[in-house]
Amino acid sequence: MKLKAILLAFLIFIAAAGSALAERTKKYDLNAILGWAGQAGGIMKSFGYHLINNYISTEVSIAVFQHSYPFSLNLTLQLPLGPVSPYVSAGYGYSLSGFGASNFAAGLKFWVSPNTGLLFDVRRFNYTYLDEKKKTTMFGIGFDYRL
């Protein structure tokens, strides 16, 4: 439990520090991912804010799969390499079954225009359902749009 509290405090600290360092050209991301999670399909929707150009962003996300609906605050680190941006993400939050919903992800964004891209994402969710700890991996494809 201490590790989760430390992770959440770290995410909040990075978000606050990034906001103070952010350039005047702030951008928002809106994305959606459809995928396969365990024995059923899933969907994840996120709204992100770029703290430091296109390298560090925070996201608020909600996912729907099987019997869980985790809502989390994520920190995403990406490396913009022209039309391709590999990224890693981690988040912590709440699901309908209680606190303790976390996720870790890695993926690629392929930008087909300056504001529109395709996402390929692998995300691991850890949560509690009916007092039992569960883990689900979601493999997904989606889109990203910069506002």
Image: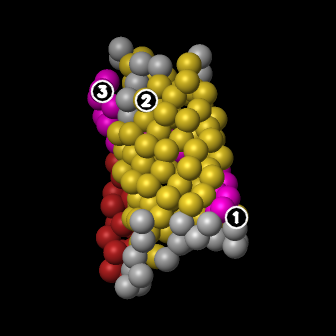
Residue 89, position as x, y percentages in the image: 53, 53
Is residue 105 in the magenta section? yes
Residue 132, position as x, y percentages in the image: 42, 17
Q: Amino acid at mark 2?
A: Val
Is residue 95 in the magenta section? yes
Can residue 46 be seen here? The reply is yes
Determine whether the residue tagged by mark 2 lies in a helix, strand or loop.
strand
Dot 2 or dot 1, earlier in sequence: 2
Circle 3 packing at 10 Å, graded few (<14), some (14-19), many (20+), is: some
Residue 48, position as x, y percentages in the image: 41, 59
- Place residue 24 in its image quadrant: bottom left
User: Mark number for residue 96?
Assistant: 3
In this rendering, which labeled residue sits more in front, label 1 or label 3? 1
**Image quarter hosting the N terminus:** top left
Determine whether the residue tagged by mark 1 lies in a helix, strand or loop.
strand
Magenta stretch in the rendered image: 92-112
Q: Of 66 and 90, which appears nearest the observer?
A: 66
Q: Amino acid at mark 1?
A: Val
Dot 2 or dot 3, earlier in sequence: 2
Q: Which residue is mark 2?
A: 64
Q: Which residue is mark 1?
A: 84
